[in-house]
Image: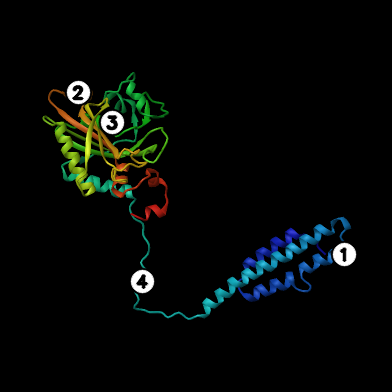
Amino acid sequence: MAELNPETTRNQAEKAIFAAQNLKDLERIFSYYLGKKGEVKKFFEKLKTVPAGQKKDWGMEANELKVFLEKEIAERKTVLEKSSSRRGKKKFFDPDRPGRKPEIGHLHPLTQAKREIISIFTSMGFNVALGPEIEDEWHNFDALNIPKDHPARDAWSTVWVKSSGEKQLLLRTHTSPMQARYLETHQPPLRIIVPGKVFRYEATDTSHEAQFYQLEGLMVDRSVSAANLKAVIGEFFKRFFGQDLRFRLRPDFFPFTEPSFEVAMTCLACLGKGCSVCKKTGWLEMAGAGMVHPNVFKACGLNPKEWKGWAFGFGWDRLAMMKYKIDNIRLFNSGDLRFLEQF
């Protein structure tokens, strides 16, 4: 007779019980393991020959095996009985009943917001321009009036990329490099928007991400002003949010604009009452903006005495947060279907 082993018997029985396809299979398994001459019976019979010091452990193992098998067989029997009952019922088939519509996916809320944003600006005469996410240092910094020794570089938490070439590469920290790239290759007057992903080496919180989306805007002509900028932003807010909103332009500093502004709007997550998104202020910064700095025109080969321009940089993640009243920017990248299926 083969050496009895409780663990081996338990594993074999468990597999057999799970594989049982009907009640007859289960009856045979019950008889083989728990019948009068079954495997479990052999464990108790061997108890007579086990040394005195091992009788207690052997008896406990045999009893545990018996209890385990009884429980597993009972649970499998319940499952098989329900399955047999369902198969025995004849279902009425209605040939005229419409088919079940398959579930399909839908656009991510950020993509929905992006498409609406682009639609609004193109209706105002803006063209869409796209640029590389891996940038060179000159376009990301130098052409935008941020030379190597400029203290403003410390404000960008840059993710650098190893490069074997002469140019130092990085993951772009903003979409503003497309200002320089577009001005190098296109003659004003012009107006463009640049939607795209940007990267910052920084911690995340309810309103900040290490990688997020920006919407750059640029308008260059012989006579444009901050009043044009404010009018365009106001019209965009009105169309995107479907209501007149309070927003403000406050003095700020950006090396590539002069004068520079912070564009903030009433926080729609709390309707201006103060929450974690707006840091209890009731206002949420939505964009940096300003008049294009003369040095940017010079770097791109244009005469700043002839051309004037303004630019803005929105975080379209934040635009989507305000539109859909979302209080945590990290939800967009969570992959949580409970969140995504709401849009």
Left or right: residue 179 versus residue 37 is: left
Q: Which residue is mark 2?
A: 294
User: Rounded to the nearest whole Å, what is the CA distance between mark 4 and mark 2?
Assistant: 65 Å
Q: Which residue is mark 1?
A: 48
Instruction: Assess disc 2: are there few (<14), some (14-19) or many (≥20) residues with their C-alpha within 10 Å of its C-alpha.
Output: many
Q: Earlier in the sequence, mark 1 or mark 4?
A: 1
- Identified by mark 1, the residue type is Lys
In what quadrant of the picture does the N terminus appear? Answer: bottom right
User: Rounded to the nearest whole Å, what is the CA distance between mark 1 and mark 2?
Assistant: 100 Å
The quarter of the picture where residue 236 lies is: top left
Q: Are marks 3 and 2 in contact (CB under 8 Å)?
A: no
In what quadrant of the picture does the C terminus appear? Answer: bottom left
Q: Nearer the viewer, mark 3 or mark 1?
A: 1
Residue that sits furthest to the left in the current view: 223
Instruction: Assess disc 3: are there few (<14), some (14-19) or many (≥20) residues with their C-alpha within 10 Å of its C-alpha.
Output: many
Q: Is residue 118 above or below residue 3?
A: above
Helix, strand or loop at mark 1:
loop
Estimate the x, y position of residue 214 in percent, counting from the top left. Answer: 30, 38
Q: Earlier in the sequence, mark 4 or mark 3?
A: 4
Estimate the x, y position of residue 114 in percent, counting from the top left. Answer: 28, 46
